[in-house]
Image (spheres, grey):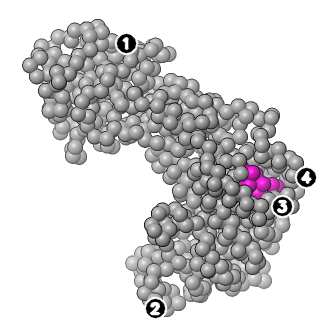
Amino acid sequence: MARDRERVIAGRYRLRQRLGSGGGGSVWLAEDEELRAQVAVKEIDVPHASDGGVDDPVGRGRKEALRAAQLREHPNVITVYDVVEAEDRPWIVMEYLPGTRDLNAVVKERGPLPSDEVARIGAAALDGLSAGHRVGIIHRDVKPSNLLLAPDHSGVPDRRVLLTDYGISLRPRETRITQSGMVIGTPGYVAPERLSGAEATPASDLFSLGVTLYFAVEGAAPFERDTIDAALMAALTTEPSVPQRASAPLSRVIMGLLAKDPLDRTQAAEAGELLAEATQSGSPATGTAPSESPVSGPRSTPLPALPAPAPARASDPASAPDTRPASEGTGKTPARRTPVLLALAAVLVVGGGGFALGAGTFRDTGHGAASAETRAKAVTSPSPTVTRGAYPYGRRAGLREELNSGQCVDADWKGGAFKGRPGLKVVDCYDDDPEGQVIATVAAGGAVQSECTRRTSELRKTMADPVLYVLTPEAGQSEPPAAACLLFLKHATLGGPLGDFRKFGDKVYVSQLGPGDCINAEKDKDGKYTETLVSCEKPHDEQMVGWTWASGDGSADSVDMGGLCQEKYGVDWARGRGHEMSGWYSTDEEWDNGFRYTLCSVDREDGKQLPGGALKPAY
């Protein structure tokens, strides 16, 4: 890497840092030693041999880059400063914009974008594409990773929209049918006519733009499938579902751009008018982005008691494993929960590296073109024959049945913890140490995010580091399932059901408990504790009063749990009343992973049970 950073291209551009790779080559942060300015330099990979010896890949790459440089003054196209040749390949010198992210990364981080924001991005991209079309330049690979969002001149993030990889790629984005009979492009985004062997045209760019806007507003592309072949066939033959999160004008422009027949496809001028209207129309209030409501730091006062749990258990309490070993004194430590191997939904996400297939594989069979009448109907309503999708929450979620309140799940967060749409699997709430639980369901449509926030508010107040995630149904279903309000814990599993889904007599883990809960704790001959949830109205061993945070990075064994609880809650709950404070934590593994919370409880110093009736703090 040190040698790479010292490379100087064309005697002028010193490579400093590799920014990334893809799109036919690597992109470097470089210094223009003549102007003393930072630039981005793209190293274009070239095939080892051209198609039958009749083409010059280096010369073709330089020619296409020079044509793209004609758009250097356009505000929505990354500016090409220079095209040079070095090491037998072309290098494209472009403007460098700190703080830039591509649309694909933004959607993965934020979830589906608001309709008006998607329309603004689409209008800017369309303007850049149209400028190229007017001078005979076809982009050939419009997709989310080739739309960059950069800060504007005042520093507001994601306000500038710029097309990149504009007509300069050789291998992954080649649009012509090669002599070997292969067509190359990106699955799910390439226009149907190209799959049938036709050349790229402005209309094929518009189709790809429609797919890109669909992805931005829905969070998933309309032709996304489990395999490359399925994605190609869907783009060629399947009518997409109407985007459910889009405003009416944005929905019309997306569906118009996705017409199979390029002659039926919405043209640039009409698309521009609809996007301008959609920019002003706002977005449906769907509340689809996941949000977190962590408990930030220790509480200074105990929280209200939970309502009496309603019966909801389906399995025998005797089947629950023993929960904790004990240490002597007032710091009580739990047993280590057995890790559960997750059986996760396997979903193939097709990347941007391109694909190749025999051009003869897909031929126009008469099913690919949609009439203008059919397309107009699709804009206003989903197909009447489809009432519930095979995957009600989309293929990424992987569930084939709708979720109901009380069900527990494990989650595979493909884009990072609590980001994007996870793969989900329904598990047993008692036997499988679940990661999350459906606390409520909310009818699809309307402000589901705010409704889920309201319905889980009281329960989240009793938890340490809760995360609320709202799972919304897949778009295009005429009878969609309800959205599911799911609760997870940062850095820990739930261990079992939460809140009203527990039952008195259940064996419970500390992560299922919260302020106001009462337990009986039984210690066996090996020193292990088993905690049972009981009513506070009857005599009980301990009452939970609140959470506290253990600072530092020491192990759980090095922390005086009882001392932490005494320091925080002792004055209110123990002093002069014959009570003492105890502390419970989750597991050593979860402690080391960041769940450094202690649940504090009050019990009697003489070891006898507390009388029936919830205790109150002294102050």
Q: Position of residue 579 (x, y in %)?
A: 14, 18
C-alpha separation, residue under disc 4 versus residue under disc 2: 58 Å
Q: Which residue is mark 1?
A: 505
Which mark is first along the chain, 3 or 4?
Answer: 3
Quarter location, residue 603: top left
Circle 3 sits on which residue? 262
4 or 2: tag closer to the N-terminus: 2
Picture residue at 18% right of the left edge, 28% below the top: 569
| Between 74 and 17, the one nearer to me in the picture | 74
Mark 3–mark 2 distance (CA, rounded to whole Å): 47 Å
Taking depth in this image into account, of 104 and 351 the one nearest to the observer is 104
Could you tell me how far apart the alpha carbons at marks 4 and 3 are, in whole angstroms? Answer: 14 Å
Label 2: which secondary element:
loop
Which residue shows up at 61% across the image and 83% down it?
90
Name the foreground residue: 508 vs 321.
508
Q: Earlier in the sequence, mark 1 or mark 3?
A: 3
Pointer 3 with pointer 2, Cβ within 8 A: no
Which range is magenta? 251-262
Is residue 481 visible in the rendered structure shown here? yes
Give the amino acid type for the residue marked by disc 4 in the picture: Gly
| Residue at mark 4 | 366
Give the residue type at disc 3. Pro
Q: Is residue 281 left or right of residue 551?
A: right
Which residue is label 2 attached to? 34
Quadrant placement of the C terminus: top left
The residue carrying pointer 1 sits among few (fewer than 14), some (14 to 19) or many (20 or more) residues within 10 Å by Cα, namely some
Q: State the separation of the CA atoms marked 4 and 1.
A: 65 Å
Q: Residues within 10 Å of mark 2 (few under 14, many from 20)?
A: few
Q: Earlier in the sequence, mark 3 or mark 2?
A: 2
Q: Mark 1 and mark 3: span between their CA atoms?
A: 66 Å
